[in-house]
């Protein structure tokens, strides 16, 4: 039976082996906000427990999920518009697009609602759903912990196609779903691979290596891609735990460049940079065109930092385990602003939606910020 390893257990396993490599969290220093970074509104719904929930938007509303179900909010003032209790606790976050909101459970149930909260359909998929579905062009794409990726009809939930790959004996539990762009589904896999699938029928268009597993033990050989690939302007980039960050041509999967780094939090792209949060909480920037390392910020070392969100080319934002949102200058990684949401962890990268930076905390808080 395949073994799933949660990232939070890695430090414990290392300690059991005689070496505890968990970094000590850096104490925050005062930051003189040099940019106007302010909270516009806050809302709350259901807590997320240990799972990775993030907001999404469709039909002019912001949707968030928690263990109990989903809720919709007015993007201008955070006013709650509706909520729907799920029959079973949600674990996979939500995807929202084209008037459809979808989320899954640990029992392998996949639910879909319309923007008013009316149930569209419910189906059973092959295994636990701990990643948010993605929706585009009438297809809901869901990833399950058994390594399968399934495309379903957005109107009735009927399966259209399914993709699967054999997996190593030991893999990380991935909370990352898939990225859809221009009719192609991009997914990071165990053993450091990135695959591109046709959204229409699930055909493999290409498959490329992000990182090569290496080491003497199964634990050392984990090189899974556990965060979302990022696609922009003919380029798709992904990063692997205990591996590399690599960028490929979307046309054929040919490698453009790669650099050694270990990350489970993820990455972001703007016109000139690729930003990565590594596995000890430092944030690094690479030149997008050739991969040259531009800067590395250790100001948040050990603070279990989320993946980054790119904010228009001048700034990036990350969250941390104490509920702080940090803004860094894209040019050199300086901390230029900070706001605290609540006191619970921010484990998913903030999202820039309709000019607002949206942050969801594990305690079920939803916060909207603006940056000028």
Image (tube, helix red, strand yellow):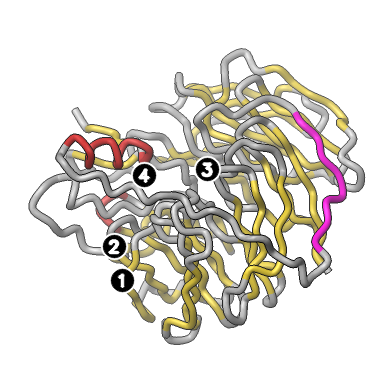
Please tell me which residue lies in front, 8 or 133: 8
Disc 4 crowd rating (10 Å Cα; few below 14, some 14-19, many 20+) is some
Q: Secondary structure at mark 3?
A: strand
Between discs 1 and 3, the one toward the N terminus: 3
> Quick check: marks 1 and 2 in contact, CB under 8 Å?
yes
Residue position for label 3: 141
Vertical comparison of 46 with 238: above or below: above
Q: Secondary structure at mark 4?
A: strand
The residues tagged by marks 1 and 3 sit, at their Cα atoms, a distance apart of: 30 Å
Between discs 2 and 3, the one toward the N terminus: 3
Q: Secondary structure at mark 2?
A: strand
Residue position for label 4: 163
Disc 2 crowd rating (10 Å Cα; few below 14, some 14-19, many 20+) is many
Residue position for label 2: 243
Span of residues in magenta: 37-44
Nearer the viewer's eye, disc 2 or disc 3? 2
The residues tagged by marks 2 and 3 sit, at their Cα atoms, a distance apart of: 26 Å
| The image quarter in which residue 197 lies | bottom left
In the image, taking residue 270 as reference, residue 234 lies left or right, namely left
Q: Is residue 355 visible?
A: no
């Amino acid at each position: 039976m395949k073994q799933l390893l949660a990232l939070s257990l890695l430090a414990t396993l290392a300690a059991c082996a005689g070496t505890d490599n968990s970094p000590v969290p850096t104490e925050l220093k005062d930051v003189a906000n040099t940019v106007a970074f302010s909270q516009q509104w806050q809302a709350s719904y259901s807590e997320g427990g240990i799972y990775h929930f993030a907001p999404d938007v469709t039909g002019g509303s912001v949707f968030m999920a928690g263990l109990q179900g989903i809720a919709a909010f007015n993007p201008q003032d955070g006013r709650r518009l509706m909520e729907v209790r799920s029959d079973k606790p949600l674990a996979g976050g939500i995807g929202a697009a084209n008037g459809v909101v979808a989320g899954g459970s640990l029992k392998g149930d996949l639910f879909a609602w319309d923007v008013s909260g009316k149930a569209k359909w419910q189906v059973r998929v092959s295994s636990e759903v701990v990643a948010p579905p993605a929706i585009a062009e009438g297809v809901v794409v869901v990833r399950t912990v058994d390594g399968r990726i399934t495309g379903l009809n957005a109107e009735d939930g009927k399966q259209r196609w399914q993709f699967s790959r054999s997996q190593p004996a030991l893999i990380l539990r991935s909370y990352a779903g898939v990225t859809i762009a221009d009719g192609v589904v991009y997914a990071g896999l165990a053993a450091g691979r990135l695959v591109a699938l046709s959204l229409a029928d699930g055909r493999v268009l290409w498959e490329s290596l992000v990182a090569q597993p290496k080491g003497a033990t199964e634990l050392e050989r984990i090189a899974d891609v556990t965060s979302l690939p990022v696609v922009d302007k003919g380029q798709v980039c992904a990063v692997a735990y205990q591996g590399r960050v690599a960028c490929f041509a979307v046309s054929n999967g040919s490698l453009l460049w790669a650099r050694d780094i270990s990350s489970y939090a993820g990455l972001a792209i703007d016109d000139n940079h690729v930003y990565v949060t590594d596995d000890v909480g430092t944030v690094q920037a690479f030149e997008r065109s050739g991969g040259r390392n531009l800067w590395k910020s250790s100001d948040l070392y050990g603070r279990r930092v989320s993946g980054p969100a790119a904010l228009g080319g001048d700034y990036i934002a990350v969250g941390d385990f104490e509920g702080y949102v940090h803004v860094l200058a894209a040019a050199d990684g300086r901390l230029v602003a900070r706001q605290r949401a609540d006191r619970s962890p921010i484990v998913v990268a903030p999202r820039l939606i309709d000019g607002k930076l949206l942050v969801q905390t594990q305690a079920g808080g939803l916060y909207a910020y603006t940056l000028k």
